[in-house]
Amino acid sequence: MAVVSCMPSISSHDTDDQFSFAVSYLGSLHPHLSENTKHIMASTKPKVVDIHTHMYPPSYIDILTSRTAIPVVRTFPQAADPRLILLDAEQQALDAALQDPTAKPPGRPLTSHYASLDQKIHFMDTHSIDISVVSLANPWLDFIEPKEAAATARSVNDEFEAMCASHPGRLFFFAALPLTAPLPALLEAVRMCASHPGRLFFFAALPLTAPLPALLEAVRHVAELEHCRGVILGTPSPPPR
């Protein structure tokens, strides 16, 4: 996969000059944010911005819960939280845990911090995080059938948009792009992302096994969007099924 990152990382250890640069950078990306820039800059306390934090929107969890093949979400009487099972190698452990309530469940816990907006805000308040930029996490959209990928991406992005709108100034999001979809549907998804009010960021899951022309076209189009800035980071991603 690849990430189109749109702002520098900020931590509580950064200097005021670094924060000033970051806020000015954000203001340059979106004209409506510029109205708040002077107010934010008046604060002498550096802001803490988390640009790598994940959430799973409700409709996305429903998709994983309804699936019969990995990746899936399953609940177990022996586990406090639902479990997200991502690896084919976990199939045997999954079958055993579903049949034996004493068996150790596979996967990783899908806690409310990943699924609940209230918990996300509570986590931010507890750890003095001023702003979070949320994004979809593994398994992203790679497992979605190509004909369904565009609609799924739109649903995810709309839910992230609603989350951010309910906490203006505190939450932003990286949009999910359906790279398994046909190229016209992918480009339409990019255009839809650009139309979100207050949209600052893009998140692009670009599988390295995608046909090169499709990948290059997606990168080219994102690069031409007026308010999108940043670099592309290549990170490991499982091959398509």
Image (cartoon, rainbow, N blue to C red):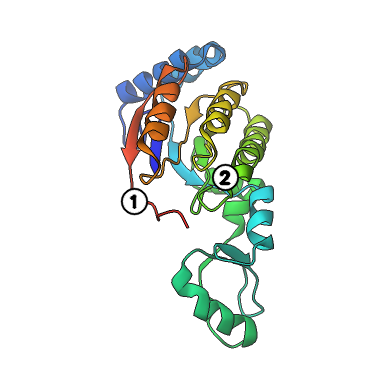
Could you say which is closer to the camera, residue 38 or residue 107?
107
Q: In the rendered picture of this protein, how many numbered marks are placed on residues?
A: 2
* Up/down of 103 relative to 66, above or below: below
Q: Residue at x 69, y 49 (%)?
A: 59
Q: Residue at x 51, y 15 (%)?
A: 30
- The percent coordinates of residue 58 (x first, y second) are 68, 50
- The percent coordinates of residue 232 (x first, y second) are 34, 33
* Up/down of 65 relative to 172, above or below: below
Q: Residue at x 41, y 16 (%)?
A: 24
- The amino acid on which the numbered mark 2 sits, given as a three-letter code, is Pro
Check disc 1 and report the residue beneath it.
236
For residue 40, which numbered disc appears in the image? none
Could you say which is closer to the camera, residue 184 or residue 91?
184
Classify residue 196 by image quadrant.
top right
Horizontal side of 165 relative to 11 (left or right) equals: right
- The percent coordinates of residue 229 (x first, y second) are 40, 22
Q: Residues within 10 Å of mark 2 (few under 14, many from 20)?
A: some
* Up/down of 105 relative to 180, above or below: below
* Up/down of 135 relative to 44, above or below: below
Horizontal side of 167 relative to 141 (left or right) equals: right
Check disc 2 and report the residue beneath it.
146
Could you say which is closer to the camera, residue 84 or residue 181?
181
Classify residue 95 by image quadrant.
bottom right
Q: Say whether residue 208 is visible.
A: yes
- The secondary structure type at the circle numbered 1 is loop
